[in-house]
Amino acid sequence: MAVVVGFIPTEVGYRALEIARTEAERRGGPLVVVNVLRDGVEQDPRHADKDDLEAALEHLRRSPVRVQVRQEHTEDDIADVLLRVVSEERAELLVIANRKRESPGRHLLGLTVQKLILSANSEVLVV
């Protein structure tokens, strides 16, 4: 069954990529790597450039499962894009990275992560 991973080019993003690879291999693949670009936002650490996507592919090169990389665009909600890809791929698992929140006043999980956990038609693994 398919595994979708929301990829961001950060340390926690690569950790999510590794866990997603392991899960895809355990489940028989394929692995769909998704990076979402927010239209109109120039500088965002979640946006992967060409080198970041090539590094992600290199990281997965030895995986025995089929790997597909998708870079999607949105003007709105990143969660909606990931939910659509999960549905299109009929994914069994969605793996996402949760950036640490440093302020104690912030919610334990970000709004995007909460929406994905509550709305996905698949299992969700938060790294």
Image: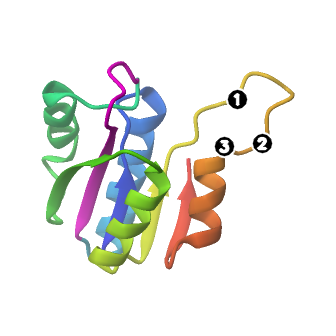
- Residue 31 on image: x %, y %: 26, 63
Furthest-top residue in this view:
43
| Badge 2 element | loop
Where residue 46 appears, as percent x and y from the top left, is 40, 31
**Element type where label 3 sits in the image:** loop
Position of residue 50 in the picture relative to residue 93 (left or right):
left
Q: Looking at the image, is mark 1 or mark 2 earlier in the sequence?
A: 1
Residue 39 lies in the magenta-colored region: yes
Q: Amino acid at mark 2?
A: Leu
The three-letter amino acid code for the residue at tag 1 is: Arg
- Circle 1 residue: 101
Q: Mark 1 touching mark 3, by CB under 8 A?
A: yes
Percent from the top left, x then y, of residue 116? 56, 61
> From the viewer's perspective, is the residue at label 2 or at label 3 nearer?
3
Circle 1 packing at 10 Å, graded few (<14), some (14-19), many (20+), is: few
Q: Secondary structure at mark 1?
A: loop
Disc 2: which residue: 108
| Colouring rule applied to residues | rainbow
In the drawing, does residue 40 fall left or right of residue 103? left
Question: Mark 1 near mark 2, Cβ–Cβ under 8 Å?
Answer: yes
First of labels 1, 3 by sequence position:
1
The answer to which of 84 and 62 lies nearer the viewer is: 84
Placement of the N terminus among the 4 image quadrants = bottom left
Magenta includes 64? no
Number of residue marks: 3
Q: Which mark is residue 110?
A: 3
Q: Which residue range is magenta in the image?
A: 30-44
Residue, x 44% and y 49% (percent of image)? Answer: 78
